[in-house]
C-alpha cells in the first residue's frame, strides 16, 4: 500500500489546527475530494482525501482532510498499519468518533477482500505457489492463527475454500471430525489442501502441525480424498509440506 504524502497535490496546506483554516467547501472544485473523484477517478486522490470522503466532516479547527492526515501520521503513513488498528484506537484522533472509526474499518476490510473475490470455477491451482498467492490475501495480516481448507475437483479447479478453525497468536484448534464433515459436504470434492498461518513469521512446522497433517491425511485416505498439501502462510513466504517431502513421511 502506498505511503501518504501530506504535501501531495490536491491536499491543502496544514493550518496547525488554528481557527483561520478554510473549510473544504471553500476549496476550488478540483481540490474537493468528492468532485476530484468524480472528475478524475478514485486513483487521483491521496489516502487522506479518500479517508476524508469516508468521515465526511472534520472539526471546528481542522478539515476532514487534515483530521485524516493526522490519523495517517500516527500510523506511519501506511494503510497497512491503519488496517491493523482496532476501531477504538482510531477514535483517539480528534475528529474521529465511533461511527467514523467503524466506517473506516469497514472500508479497509472491503478493500482487503477485493483480491479474494474470483470466479472459483476458473481457478486452477497447480502448484504450492499458486495456492500461496490464492490464499495470501486471506491470511497474511492476521495476528492470530486460522486454519483453512481449499476444496478441489479432480482437475484441481477450486470448488470452495473456507475457514475451519481459529486460534491464538501461536496455535489453532483442530477438530478432525468437523473438518472431514466440511469436506464431505462439498459435492464433487476429490482433493483438499490444508492451510494455516504463522503470525510470528517463523514458517517451520511445529510438532502439532505435523500431527494435524498426519491425522487429516489418514482420514482423507479412508474416503478416497486426495490430501495434496499442507501450506503454512507467511506475509511474503510459505512452507509446503509436499514440496519439502514432509507430507510423504507422515
Image: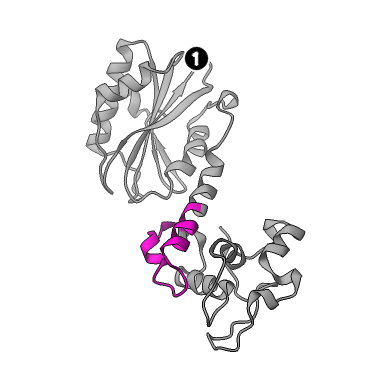
Q: Main secondary structure of the magenta part?
A: helix
Q: Is residue 207 left or right of residue 69?
A: left
- Quadrant of the rendered image containing residue 40: bottom right
- Quadrant of the rendered image containing residue 238: top left
Closer-to-camera residue (57/2)? 57
Where is 210 relative to 151, above or below?
A: below
Q: Is residue 84 left or right of residue 40?
A: left
Closer-to-camera residue (169/248)? 169
Q: Is residue 89 magenta?
A: yes
Q: In what quadrant of the picture does the N terminus appear?
A: bottom right
Where is 204 relative to 62, above or below?
A: above
Q: In what quadrant of the picture does the C terminus appear?
A: top left
At mark 1, the secondary structure is loop
Closer-to-camera residue (204/40)? 40
Closer-to-camera residue (208/150)? 150
Q: Is residue 105 magenta?
A: yes
Instruction: Identify the magenta region.
Output: 83-106
Q: Work out whether residue 243 can be spotted.
A: no
In percent of the image, x 61 and y 85: which residue is there?
21
Q: Work out whether residue 203 can be spotted.
A: yes
Residue identifier under label 1: 154
Amino acid at each position: 500500500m502506498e505511503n501518504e504524502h501530506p504535501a501531495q497535490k490536491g491536499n491543502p496546506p496544514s493550518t496547525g489546527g488554528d481557527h483561520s483554516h478554510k473549510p473544504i467547501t471553500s476549496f476550488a472544485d478540483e481540490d474537493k475530494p468528492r468532485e476530484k473523484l468524480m472528475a478524475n477517478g478514485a486513483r487521483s486522490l491521496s489516502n487522506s482525501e479518500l479517508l476524508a470522503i469516508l468521515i465526511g466532516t472534520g472539526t471546528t479547527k481542522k478539515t476532514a482532510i487534515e483530521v485524516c492526515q493526522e490519523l495517517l501520521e500516527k500510523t506511519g503513513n501506511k494503510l497497512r498499519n491503519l488496517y491493523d488498528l482496532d476501531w477504538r484506537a482510531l477514535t483517539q484522533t480528534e475528529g474521529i468518533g465511533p461511527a467514523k472509526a467503524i466506517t473506516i474499518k469497514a472500508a479497509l476490510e472491503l478493500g482487503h477482500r477485493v483480491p479474494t473475490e474470483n470466479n472459483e470455477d476458473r481457478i486452477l491451482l497447480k502448484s504450492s505457489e499458486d495456492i500461496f498467492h490464492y490464499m495470501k490475501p486471506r491470511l497474511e495480516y492476521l495476528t492470530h492463527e486460522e486454519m483453512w481448507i481449499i476444496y478441489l475437483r479432480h482437475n484441481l479447479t477450486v470448488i470452495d475454500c473456507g475457514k475451519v478453525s481459529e486460534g491464538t497468536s501461536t496455535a489453532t484448534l483442530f477438530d478432525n471430525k468437523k473438518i472431514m464433515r466440511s469436506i464431505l459436504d462439498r459435492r464433487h470434492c476429490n482433493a483438499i489442501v490444508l492451510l494455516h498461518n504463522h503470525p510470528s513469521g517463523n514458517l517451520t512446522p511445529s510438532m502439532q502441525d505435523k500431527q494435524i497433517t498426519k491425522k487429516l491425511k489418514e482420514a482423507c485416505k479412508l474416503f478416497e480424498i486426495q490430501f495434496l498439501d499442507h501450506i503454512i502462510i507467511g506475509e511474503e513466504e510459505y512452507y509446503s509440506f509436499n514440496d519439502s517431502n514432509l507430507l510423504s513421511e507422515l
